[in-house]
Image (spheres, helix red, strand yellow):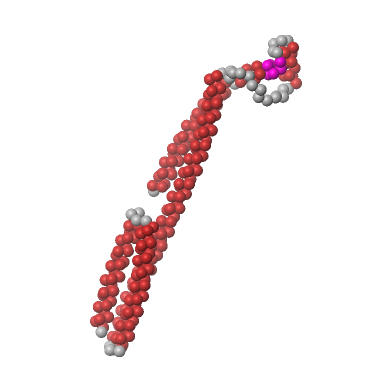
Amino acid sequence: MAENIRNRLKELEEEFSKVFRAVNEELKRVEAGEAGAQALESIRDQLHALRRRLLAARLEMRAMLREARLKLEENVVDELEEEVDEFFDKWSDALEGFLEDLREVARELSRARARDFELEDLSRVVEASLQQTARGLELALSKLREALEKGFAGPSYVVSSVRLPQRDLEVVDALVEAGVFRSRSEAVAFFAHKGIEASKPLFEEALAKLEELRKARERLGEELRKALGGEQAG
């Protein structure tokens, strides 16, 4: 009877070892990135099935020990009980260790997926912002470049009324009365045009600065894309 119990423990040892080896190999694949969430579910199912199998085997061995008490000496049965308890304690601890490893791997995968989503969202936001900035810069550059190329010449338009200092208004009126200009509007338009012409170097400098800003934006976009791509690859 004692030999039957020990032989049964050896059979269970082989059975559980085989399952644990298979689960361990699959868990290694997940940790190495060769398998994903589906493999984790499979491992979890196998470990829960193994837990149920351990419970069934423990009940089986208890039944064998009860039968042994009817046939063997007490000290022999006590020794067998100790061997059985040690056996199941060992495999129960191993099972809990595997389950904890599995939970840790699952948490790490979850964090990795969250980081990927955050990086993708950040990348989309940055890209949209850069594109919007690019459109604004291109529009400003286009308008300013066109104005500089035309020399600010062109047909007259009514833009808005303006308030002039009293002294400036007196000068304008004097020029109109002298016949230099036909009206206040013509005089104001002339001096406004001359003022813009005189400021042409400033506008050209502004155009150069806008060009620099556009190039800086392009460099920033490229660096951000590289950085985000590097983090996702890592």
The quadrant in which residue 60 appears is bottom left
**In screen coordinates, is 213 left or right of 226?**
right
Q: Residue at x 29, y 86 (%)?
A: 68
Q: Residue at x 28, y 89 (%)?
A: 71
Q: In this orientation, does residue 97 appear?
A: no
Q: Is residue 196 above or below residue 95?
A: above
185 is higher (above) or lower (below) than 110: above
| Residue 91 on image: x %, y % | 33, 72
Rendered position, 106 above or below 54: above
Q: Is residue 203 magenta?
A: no
Please provide percent x and percent y for residue 43. Answer: 35, 63
User: Which residue is more in the foreground, 225 or 86?
Assistant: 225
| Residue 75 image offset from top left, x and y in percent | 30, 87
Quarter location, residue 227:
top left
Horizontal and vertical percent for residue 215? Answer: 47, 32
Residue 223 in sight from this viewpoint: yes
Q: Residue at x 72, y 13 (%)?
A: 176
User: Which one is in front, 93 or 15?
Assistant: 15
In the rendered picture of this protein, how many numbered marks are placed on residues? 0
Residue 210 or 131: which is nearer the viewer?
Answer: 131
The main secondary structure of the magenta stretch is: helix
Q: Which residues are magenta?
A: 183-188
Residue at the spot x=25%, y=78% of the render? 7
Say left or right for 153 vs 15: right
Q: Quadrant of residue 87?
A: bottom left
Image height of 146 relative to 8, above or below: above
Q: Quadrant of the N terminus?
A: bottom left
